[in-house]
Each structure stands twice: as structure tokens, then as C-alpha cells.
């Protein structure tokens, strides 16, 4: 356990030390590439003004992630219980992911204005697809013999779904949630670029336009930290909910 934690920490510290030494030795201007110490200093000194942007992004991310999760689960369930609809709609879901969000975003602003609605829609579009696909895969990977056994025992379609297929798909659902948790932060930042009065995306835009590269790096590191926190929360929930599943060592 200690080795798994120590090796990444050592690697990160080594990169930061090389970065710090290179910036000072080569005398790279701060507006091009600030040293890590300058970034940390700016983060500490500017936190009073920066924290409102962080909390705005966190609240937007949380709301969009919840909506995207619900949409993904509902769509997956409908496509699973309605095979005909799945054959017609599933290709459209795949095509929807080929449209870059940054291209679709201006249309959402035109249709829904500069309020919170287009921002939530962007996060939802980013989040729902991994959850829907992972959940569908979980449903489809249910043991056919168990389904046949339950039907032979007189179970209805609803009972087969709620007592077998849905529990079997829970690990796959969490796989989609972990992907969407990190995507949701990215979607929130992109949505804030379109037009908002606060948020990490707004902070980055103002910092880049004024050549405050240190502030841009502060925003980048905070985004990485938020992604890690959201990812860790999902992993924690997964461990709590899936306590009944044996580990690889126990199953072997």
C-alpha cells in the first residue's frame, strides 16, 4: 500500500523539482512558464478572490453530474427493456458523441440564453454517454443461464430486471460514473467559457487575457484536484455499495 502511494508522490515531487530548477537556471520569464513556487505563492495570496470561482464550478459540476447520471441510467434502462428502440436510438447516441462540445455550445447559448440551463446541458451531454453505455454493457453481460433459471422459476420480466440484471450491472455503472465524474469538471469549465460571471473557466479566461500565466496554472491544478476528488468520492461509494462482492483474491 505504501509503495503504491509513495511512487507517484516521488514522481510528482521530482517533476516539480526539475521544473523549478529549469525555470530558474534558464531564467524563463514568468509570463511564459512560471516556477512551481510562484504558482503556489499566487494560489495562497489569491485564494480569497479565487475561492468564489472554485465553489461556483463545484456547484455547477455537481448539478450537471447528477442530471447526467440520472439521464444516463434512465436511457440505459429504456434501451435495455425496449430492444426495438435500442436498435434505432443507439447509433444516434454514438453519433452524438462525435459532435465536439465546444462546437455545440454556441448553439445552446442561442437556444437557451446565457443562464445556467445551457451550462447544465453541456455537462449532461458530457456525462450521460459513459454511464449509459457502461450500464447497457452491464445489463447485456448478465449470465444467460441465471436469467433462464429465474424465468423457469416463474419470475416476471420486472423481477428478472430488478433482482438480477440491475444488481449485476452495478459495477459497470460505477465504471461509467468514474469516467463521467472527471468529464463533468471539464464540461463545467467549458460551459463557463461561454458566458458566466464566475467560475474557474471565467478565472482562466481573465488570467490568460492579462498574461497571468501563474493564475492559469493555479486554475489548471485546481481542476486536476477537483477531478481527483470527484473520482475518489465515486471510488469510496463503490467500495461501500459493493462490499458484498468478493475481491479477486477471495474469488480465486
Image (spheres, rainbow, N blue to C red):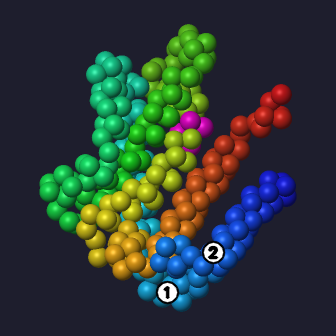
Distance CA(mark 2)–CA(mark 1): 27 Å
Tell me what residue is drawn at x 77 percent, y 38 percent. Answer: 247
Query: Against 123, is 41 above or below?
Result: below
Question: How far from the left and from the top, in percent, is residue 128?
Answer: 40, 44
Instruction: Answer with the quarter of the image where residue 98 lies.
Output: top left
Tell me what residue is drawn at x 46 percent, y 20 percent. Answer: 156
Q: Is residue 240 left or right of residue 90?
A: right
Question: Which residue is disc 1 drawn over?
Answer: 46
Tell me what residue is drawn at x 35 percent, y 50 percent. Answer: 124
Marks 2 & 1, CB-CB < 8 Å contact: no
Q: Which mark is residue 65?
A: none
In magenta, the rendered stretch is: 170-174
Say which of marks 2 and 1 sits in front.
2
The secondary structure type at the circle numbered 1 is loop
Question: How far from the left and from the top, in percent, is residue 81?
Answer: 39, 24
Q: Nearer the viewer, residue 147 or 75?
A: 75
Quadrant where the C terminus lies?
Answer: top right
Question: Which residue is disc 2 drawn over?
Answer: 26
Task: Say whether disc 2 or disc 1 marks the residue closer to the N-terminus.
Answer: 2
Query: Against 139, is 189 above or below?
Result: below
Query: Against 232, is 204 above or below?
Result: below
- Specify whether residue 160 is in view: no
Amino acid at each position: 500500500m505504501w509503495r503504491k502511494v509513495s511512487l507517484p508522490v516521488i514522481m510528482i515531487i521530482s517533476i516539480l523539482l526539475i521544473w523549478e530548477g529549469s525555470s530558474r537556471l534558464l531564467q524563463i520569464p514568468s509570463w511564459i512558464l512560471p516556477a512551481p513556487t510562484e504558482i503556489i505563492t499566487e494560489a495562497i495570496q489569491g485564494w480569497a478572490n479565487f475561492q468564489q470561482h472554485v465553489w461556483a464550478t463545484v456547484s455547477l459540476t455537481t448539478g450537471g453530474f447528477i442530471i447526467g447520471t440520472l439521464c444516463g441510467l434512465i436511457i440505459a434502462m429504456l434501451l435495455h427493456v425496449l430492444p426495438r428502440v435500442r436498435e434505432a436510438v443507439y447509433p444516434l447516441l454514438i453519433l452524438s458523441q462525435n459532435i465536439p462540445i465546444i462546437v455545440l455550445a454556441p448553439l445552446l447559448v442561442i437556444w437557451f440564453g446565457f443562464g445556467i440551463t445551457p451550462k447544465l446541458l453541456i455537462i449532461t451531454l458530457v456525462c450521460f454517454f459513459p454511464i449509459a453505455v457502461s450500464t447497457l454493457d452491464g445489463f447485456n453481460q448478465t449470465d444467460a443461464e441465471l436469467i433462464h433459471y429465474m424465468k423457469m422459476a416463474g419470475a416476471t420480466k420486472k423481477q428478472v430486471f430488478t433482482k438480477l440484471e440491475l444488481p449485476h450491472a452495478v459495477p459497470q455503472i460505477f465504471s461509467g460514473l468514474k469516467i463521467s465524474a472527471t468529464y463533468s469538471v471539464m464540461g463545467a469549465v467549458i460551459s463557463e467559457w461561454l458566458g458566466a460571471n464566475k467560475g474557474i473557466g471565467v478565472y482562466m479566461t481573465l488570467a490568460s487575457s492579462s498574461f497571468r500565466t501563474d493564475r492559469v496554472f493555479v486554475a489548471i491544478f485546481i481542476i486536476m484536484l477537483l477531478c481527483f476528488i470527484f473520482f475518489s468520492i465515486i471510488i469510496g461509494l463503490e467500495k461501500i455499495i459493493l462490499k458484498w462482492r468478493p475481491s479477486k483474491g477471495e474469488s480465486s
